[in-house]
Amino acid sequence: MLLRAFEFLKTHPQEVTDDASLVECIGEKVKIVMGEEENIKITTSQDLKKIQTSSIRVGQGMDVHPFCEVPQRKLILGGIEIPYSKGLQGHSDADVLTHAICDSLLGAAGFSDIGTHFPDHDPQYENIASLVLLEKVVDKIGAAGYTINNIDVTVVAQVPKIQPMIPEMKICLSKVMKISISQIAIKATTTEKMGFVGREEGIVAFAISTLKI
């Protein structure tokens, strides 16, 4: 069709702006499909300025909590309860994974850490669900004009094995952050029985976040 349109232009010279307008010259219909604002085609100087003013911000977060001997203390990771005999010690629910995400998001936005925003001496945050804190962090960065691009988390734990629960964690976290589960990566590893994690004394989580503005 395109070849036929160009052959037509040879014998019927006229001004066309692009392939679509050329195809219309031979009586073919052109269908318009909705695009995405982020899929920018650089055509004018204004388009170039838009590219230059947009940016990706990167933040990292890390958190660690020891296991505690408090009876009935639940182990919460990524917003869900993990079957295990011990929970983690902390002022909130001690969700080390979610705390690391919060810090990475705050860092990417240029804000202070989670402890500054939600101090562990404030009674209103005692035993609070970390998903609530994450929701507050998402609201903070959203108000500053940022949107979440992706989240990458590594959980370091000798026990328990969390791999089977990762899909459920991603679903839970994606709902709070209002992003697709495809934008969240959660990996689990051990320290091969070295250090306090290897001695089964606690869990560490590392997170990297990228934000778009």
Image (tube, rainbow, N blue to C red):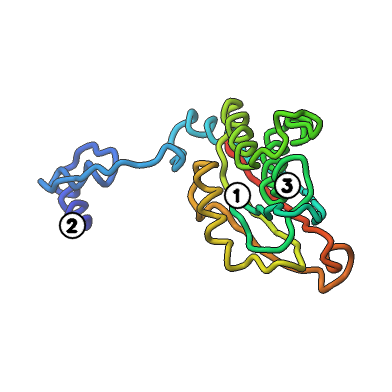
The mark nearer the N terminus, 3 or 2, is 2
Q: For this rendering, which residue is in front, 159 or 174?
A: 159
Q: What is the secondary structure assignment of the residue under circle 1? A: loop
Q: Quadrant of residue 31?
A: top left
> Pointers 1 and 2 in contact (CB under 8 A)?
no
The mark nearer the N terminus, 1 or 3, is 1
For residue 5, above or below residue 212: below
For residue 112, above or below residue 177: above
Q: Is residue 95 left or right of residue 170?
A: right
Residue indicated by mark 1: 79
Distance (Cα) linking label 1 and label 2: 55 Å
On the image, the x and y values in percent for residue 148 come to 57, 41
> Pointers 3 and 2 in contact (CB under 8 A)?
no
Kind of residue sitting beneath label 3: Ala
Residue indicated by mark 2: 1
Residue indicated by mark 3: 94
Q: Residue at x 71, y 33 (%)?
A: 125
Q: For mark 2, does the 10 Å Cα neighbourhood hold few (<14), some (14 to 19), or many (20 or more) residues?
A: few
Q: For mark 3, does the 10 Å Cα neighbourhood hold few (<14), some (14 to 19), or many (20 or more) residues?
A: many
Q: Residue at x 63, y 44 (%)?
A: 210
Kind of residue sitting beneath label 1: Gly
On the image, the x and y values in percent for residue 187 come to 65, 63
Circle on res. 172: none
Kind of residue sitting beneath label 2: Met
On the image, the x and y values in percent for residue 172 come to 53, 50
